Amino acid sequence: MYRGKKQSSLRVLMIGTTLLLLTGLCWPKDKGDQSDIAKRIDESAKVLNEVMATPDKAIPDKVMKDAKCIAVVPSMFKVALGFGGSHGKGVATCRTEHGWSAPAPITITGGSWGLQIGGQAVDLVMVVTNDQGMQHLLQSKFKLGADASAAAGPVGRNAGADTDWKMKAEVLTYSRARGVFAGIDLNGAAITQDKDETRVLYQDMVPFAEILNGKVNPPPSAEPFLAAVRKYAGQAQEAKTARK
């Protein structure tokens, strides 16, 4: 009788300890996830600020002012063994009639970058140039070069004003590696909504189009990134002239 009670007590103690351990393991992970997406947003802002701080090597003002959407992927990892490939995570924002949307977490994968051996981390900036390209982005999954035309973007703050870049590509792509910033061909790469980080950032699985259409309030952690976008790409028609 006594032994049975003792065994029952031990069993309850073991179950309670296991639950506490599981809870302890889950809680730091959730906090870690929050930290990861906040860090990625900060890094995206830093990349945009650093790129635009060098006039002769920056994205042209004309390209930025006419941008429909802007996406930044800090430290995308490029790896190759025979043919190149890529994988990275970042955030995107689009113009709305009231300004720039809350950031939407994205993932980019794939794409051949030529014959090479080795690995390299690069920063990536993508500029959606027209409404058609924006509609592709709102679908939450599309492939550059197949669903949306893409091209290496022109470089230089004052360049591109008299070119036909807007007619040729729905998405202009740029990369920075080892301090060198240039247009890059990312045809074949797939861009999708990062659903896991969307849940972390907004505490729910919010549809891509809902975020990028401006129907979701940006979290406080998004302000550095949105401030950088507003600085270089402008507020959407100055928020429709202060909403008249």
Image (spheres, rainbow, N blue to C red):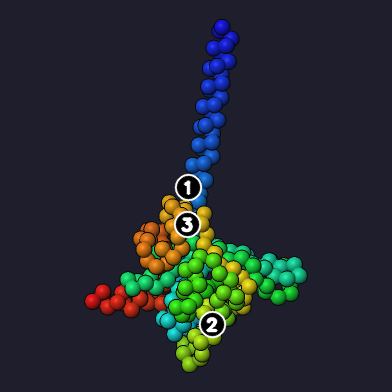
**Residue situated furthest right in the rendering:** 82
Q: CA distance from mark 3 to mark 2?
A: 28 Å
**Residue situated furthest bottom in the rendering:** 162
Count the marks: how many? 3
Say which element carries label 1.
helix
Residue at image mark 3: 198
**Kind of residue indicated by mark 2:** Ala
Q: CA distance from mark 3 to mark 1?
A: 15 Å
Mark 2 or mark 1: whose residue is earlier in sequence:
1
Q: Is residue 103 left or right of residue 172?
A: left
Q: Is residue 233 left or right of residue 241?
A: right
Which residue is depicted at the point 41% across and 77% down? 233
Of the 4 image quadrants, the one containing the N terminus is top right
Which residue is depicted at the point 54% across and 26% down? 15
Foreground pick, 135 / 163 = 135
Q: Position of residue 148 (x, y in %)?
A: 55, 76
Question: Up-down: is 200 above or below 173?
Answer: above
Of the 4 image quadrants, the one containing the C terminus is bottom left
Residue at image mark 2: 169
**Kind of residue indicated by mark 1:** Lys
